Image: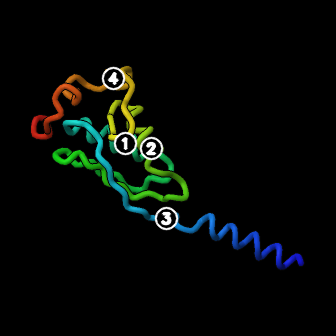
């Protein structure tokens, strides 16, 4: 009976962990304009436990990530990013967070690519 119980528990643990990848590639759009934005966005993403790689592309506004899904998820990363003043499609930075970014990084008024200027 004890072996049956251990087998059942092991089976549940296996199912709970199924589908979570150690090196999952994800990407999503993050608003920003320049190299200062790039540094801020990537640092915020990399500050989330489980994020192994972060690269934000200035022209496309795409943030490419490699994450450990057992430790984090896209909403945790987006929460960190809006915390430093950058909007995503699902989450918006507070006015206070947005106002904390450098004046040249104000993308809400003009979301053009200023990557060549900084």
Image coords of residue 41 (percent x, y): 33, 40
Occupied quadrant, residue 12: bottom right
* Callout 4: SS: loop
Return the disc, 2 or 4, that comes first in the chain's sequence.
2
Q: Residues within 10 Å of mark 1 (few under 14, many from 20)?
A: some
* Callout 3: SS: loop
Residue wearing tag 2: 47
Residue at image position (75%, 69%) is 9
Residue at image position (52%, 64%) is 20
Return the disc, 2 or 3, that comes first in the chain's sequence.
3
Q: CA distance from mark 3 to mark 4?
A: 34 Å
- When the figure is inspected, residue 42 is found, relative to residue 111, above or below; the finding is below
Q: CA distance from mark 1 to mark 4?
A: 16 Å
Q: CA distance from mark 2 to mark 4?
A: 18 Å
Residue at image position (20%, 36%) is 33
Q: CA distance from mark 2 to mark 3?
A: 17 Å
- When the figure is inspected, residue 90 is found, relative to residue 96, above or below; the finding is below
Residue wearing tag 3: 22
Image coords of residue 117 (percent x, y): 10, 35
Q: Residues within 10 Å of mark 2 (few under 14, many from 20)?
A: some
Return the disc, 3 or 4, that comes first in the chain's sequence.
3
Q: Looking at the figure, which quarter contains the N terminus? A: bottom right
The furthest residue to the right = 1
Residue wearing tag 1: 43
């Amino acid at each position: 009976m004890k072996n049956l119980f251990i087998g059942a528990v092991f089976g549940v643990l296996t199912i709970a962990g199924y589908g979570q990848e150690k090196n999952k590639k994800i990407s999503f759009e993050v608003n920003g304009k320049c190299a200062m934005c790039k540094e801020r966005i990537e640092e915020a993403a990399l500050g989330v436990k489980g994020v192994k790689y972060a690269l934000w592309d200035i022209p496309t506004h795409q943030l490419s990530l490699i994450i450990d899904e057992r430790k984090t998820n896209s909403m945790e990363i987006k929460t960190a990013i809006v915390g430093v003043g950058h909007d995503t499609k699902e989450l918006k930075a507070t006015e206070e967070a947005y106002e904390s970014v450098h004046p040249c990084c104000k993308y809400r008024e003009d979301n053009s690519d200023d990557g060549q200027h900084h």
